[in-house]
Image (spheres, rainbow, N blue to C red):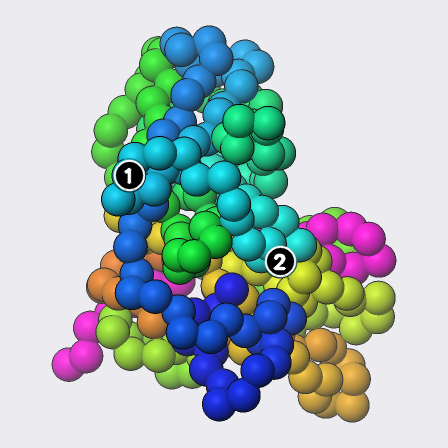
Amino acid sequence: MDPDVRSKAPGFCPRCGMKLVAGIPDPREYPVRILTTPRLLKPGADVQLDFRVEDPKTSKPVRDFEIMHEKLFHLFVVSQDLRFFVHEHPQMQPDASFRLGMQFPEPGVYRVLSDFYPKGGTPQLIANTLIVPGPGLKFTPAKLRADLGPQRSENLEVELSTDPPQPIAGLKTLMFFRLKPNDGIEPYIGAMGHMLAASADLIDMIHTHPFLVTDPAGGEFKQIQFNLIFPREGMYRVWVQFQRKGAVNTVAFNVPVTVLK
């Protein structure tokens, strides 16, 4: 759900297609507890992750969730060096927890971002941290260099331009992604694109969806626009996902953000 979308009448969100909810309550953060099996994480080994969402008032497990973008639970996992990125969808279990099996490729610190919508609450984006011990484990933030050049993935080339050309912290940045070739581009999990932006220190993480989809230049490319406010100065890793002819394309850009001078 896009919480900034408002309407004077019942209807559906023009960005993601979700049914608009009347009288959204005041935001409350729902804690997420992560249980790992085995408890000691090892790089390259299978691990089972169980996510338990708790009611902030009663601490009891939350059992009812709204569907967002065709799923009950969206999960992002990002490594501290920002080279590892996954967007998965844990499955709900009989006890109302959510379960996912995966592997962590290397020792390190991983940020785990849970995106869900508890019924009767507000959309949630909850960050947790998991540490995978092993040789070479470091706790220093990633050092990124600006990378705004065209990116290629499964069957798409993606170009990025921004307005303003130099994004400014605290102000809206329009981000225009040009997708080529412009055929067979289709919704992916209920939206024409998904974005996760993360600061180099993994303190700020933002999940959002397209604001506008157009076909300028006579259809030579498809342009998908996201609007984003970067909260602080620094370098941000921005992943975007688009689907073409059934193939999910994931590309990333390193975007420098400055302050207003």
Q: Residue at x 19, y 79 (%)?
A: 260
**Residue 238 location (% of width, % of height):** 46, 57
Q: Secondary structure at mark 2?
A: loop
Crowding around mark 2 (Cα neighbors within 10 Å: few <14, some 14 to 19, many 20+) is some
- Figure check: 58 above or below 180: above
**Amino acid type, label 1:** Thr
Range drawn in magenta: 241-261
- Figure check: 251 above or below 173: above
Where residue 155 sits, quadrant-wise, is bottom right
Q: Is residue 114 left or right of residue 230?
A: right
Query: In which quadrant will I find the C terminus?
Result: bottom left
Where residue 152 sits, quadrant-wise, is bottom right
Q: Which residue is mark 1?
A: 58
**Residue 230 location (% of width, % of height):** 31, 67
Crowding around mark 1 (Cα neighbors within 10 Å: few <14, some 14 to 19, many 20+) is few
Q: Is residue 218 left or right of residue 5?
A: right
Mark seen at residue 69: 2
Q: Secondary structure at mark 1?
A: loop
